[in-house]
Image (tube, rainbow, N blue to C red):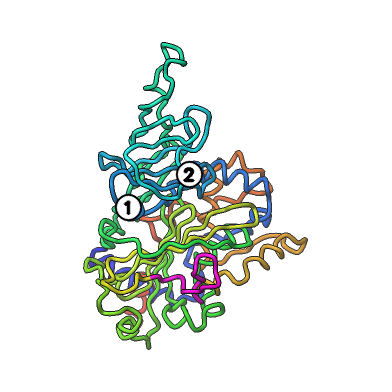
């Protein structure tokens, strides 16, 4: 939750951003990024090995495994995983791989059982992963130790009702990984939000191409003239870079926009609002990027993540999720998709998402040409550059071939809690007051 002083400071920064005539004083010039970061099989392999194996990744919501014994399969990061609501009430994750001969322990996307039994030879496990049943036990050696042959765990932690997994035993805890974002998200009731919608769509472009369209507002007036532009004043946008590659975007509505009247139309009155959300979440567009692949606006009505999963160098699976507090007896809210019986899952992307993804395949094809040499980014796109810096640091800069690296130019002085813009704004405001006197 932001203090009133923080709210006032961020509101002042939004106004200052709208009036500046260049990047802030001392902000580093962002060097061109190598084009091959989007087209290189070598770099893609490094991402898979080091980024998606070491980061906290969105796995699901407790509503998908609501009771003890419920389980779900998850394989968005390659290896097959099972997430289990244990009979003891603890949510855990395991490799969905029997310790006998490697068959999957469960073969359904969702299910419920007090025991997990491999269909191949009926080795049986408790929901805490313990091996408790081996048919024809007498045919194994007398010293065969079942206690060390349980399902192999994958780290699993929850933020309220939202489940995350991490393949790296040495990674920091989830709240430490999120840093200040965990504190800022406390007002959004992650412990009370329900899963309203979760749908996936396949895109024909590199995952970063798809995701980075949601990490800046530079494109808003051009791509979203009738959807986002009437809601967001891109000129008064404030970007904040957090440690670990995370980021936040905060932008007010246009000055002539009556947000409350529009929301009354968009959101039926029976939907509960999250009453703990503060002024910024109620009146501005507040959006977070959580490294490596989660982007989500947050408000007093929704937490609707867009999650980008690489499925190959040139393809991406986009998950469109809506969390909400409650929606009464009406249809569950779905911010990102609309009904379409012609689609395999009966849903299609909403216009806003179609606008962001419409050029993905063409961009990827163009990037693979000899005409794509490098990527120059502006100050408004600094969150993207910070993301790429973090990618290289996660991989290990020494492991990234020199021709694929980005230079580490955005330093701690521009990373939360530091913000040189505040001092510049205060100096300029003081000078303006003196001139007026």
- Badge 2: how crowded within 10 Å, few (<14), some, or many (20+)? some
Along the line of sight, the residue nearer the viewer: 110 or 10: 110
Q: Residue at x 36, y 65 (%)?
A: 196
Q: Position of residue 185 (x, y in %)?
A: 31, 59
Query: Would residue 340 be counted in the magenta stretch?
Result: yes
Q: Which mark is residue 16?
A: none
Give the image location of residue 382, x and y in percent: 51, 62
Assign the N terminus to one quadrant of the image: bottom left
Q: Which of the numbered marks, if any, corresponds to residue 62? A: 1
**What is the magenta segment's predominant secondary structure?**
loop
Callout 1: 10 Å neighbours few (<14), some, many (20+)? Answer: many
The alpha-carbon separation of the residues under discs 1 and 2 comes to: 20 Å
Quarter residue 161 falls in:
bottom left
- Residue 423 visible in the displayed image: no
Q: Is residue 405 left or right of residue 28?
A: right
| Residue at 47% from the left image edge and 58% from the top image edge | 307
Secondary structure found at label 2: loop
N-terminal-most mark, 1 or 2: 1
- Quadrant of image for the C terminus: bottom left
Residue 360, image x and y in percent? Answer: 62, 66
Q: Is residue 316 left or right of residue 297?
A: right
Residue at the farthest bottom position: 256
Q: Which residue, given by chain and number where applicable, does mark 2 sit on?
A: 107
Indicate which label's residue lies in the foreground, 1 or 2: 2
Q: Magenta segment range?
A: 334-351
Q: In this orientation, does residue 367 appear?
A: yes
Residue shown at 57%/46% (left/top)?
Answer: 47
Q: Nearer the viewer, residue 263 or 368?
A: 263
Q: Nearer the viewer, residue 222 or 334?
A: 334
Q: Residue 179, relative to residue 251: is it above or below?
A: above
377 within the magenta span: no
């Amino acid at each position: 939750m932001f203090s009133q002083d923080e709210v006032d400071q961020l509101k002042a920064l939004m106004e200052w951003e709208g009036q500046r005539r260049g990047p802030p004083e001392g902000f580093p010039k962002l060097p061109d990024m190598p084009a091959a970061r989007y087209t290189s099989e070598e770099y893609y392999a490094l991402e898979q090995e080091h980024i998606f194996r070491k980061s906290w990744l969105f796995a699901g919501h407790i509503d998908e495994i609501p009771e003890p014994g419920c389980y779900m399969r998850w394989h968005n990061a390659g290896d097959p995983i099972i997430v289990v609501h244990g009979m003891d009430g603890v949510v855990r994750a395991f490799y969905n791989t029997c310790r006998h001969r490697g068959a999957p322990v469960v073969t359904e996307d969702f299910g419920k059982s007090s025991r997990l039994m491999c269909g191949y030879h009926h080795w049986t496990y408790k929901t805490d992963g313990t091996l408790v049943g081996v048919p024809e036990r007498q045919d194994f050696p007398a010293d065969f130790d079942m206690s060390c042959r349980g399902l192999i765990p994958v780290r699993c932690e929850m933020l309220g009702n939202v489940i995350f997994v991490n393949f790296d035993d040495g990674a920091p805890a989830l709240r430490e990984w999120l840093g200040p974002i965990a504190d800022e998200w406390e007002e959004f009731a992650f412990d009370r939000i329900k899963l309203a919608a979760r749908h996936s769509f396949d895109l024909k472009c590199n995952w970063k191409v798809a995701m980075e369209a949601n990490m800046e507002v530079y494109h808003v007036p051009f791509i979203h003239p009738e959807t986002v532009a009437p809601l967001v004043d891109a000129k008064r946008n404030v970007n904040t870079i957090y440690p670990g590659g995370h980021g936040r975007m905060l932008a007010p509505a246009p000055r002539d926009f009556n947000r409350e009247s529009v929301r009354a139309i968009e959101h039926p009155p029976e939907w509960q609002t999250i009453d703990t959300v503060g002024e910024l979440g109620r009146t501005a567009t507040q959006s977070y990027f959580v490294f490596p692949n989660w982007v989500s606006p947050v408000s007093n009505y929704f937490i609707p993540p867009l999650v980008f999963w690489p499925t190959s160098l040139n393809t991406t699976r986009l998950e469109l999720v809506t969390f909400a507090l409650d929606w009464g007896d009406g249809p569950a809210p779905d911010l990102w998709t609309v009904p379409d019986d012609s689609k395999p899952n009966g849903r299609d992307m909403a216009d806003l998402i179609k606008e962001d993804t419409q050029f993905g395949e063409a961009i990827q094809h163009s990037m693979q040409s000899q005409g794509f040499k490098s990527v120059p980014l502006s100050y408004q796109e600094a969150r993207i550059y910070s993301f790429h810096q973090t990618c290289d640091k996660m991989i290990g800069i020494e492991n990234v071939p020199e021709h694929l690296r980005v230079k580490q130019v955005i330093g701690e002085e521009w990373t939360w809690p530091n913000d040189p813009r505040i001092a510049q704004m205060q100096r300029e405001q003081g000078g303006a007051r003196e001139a007026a006197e």
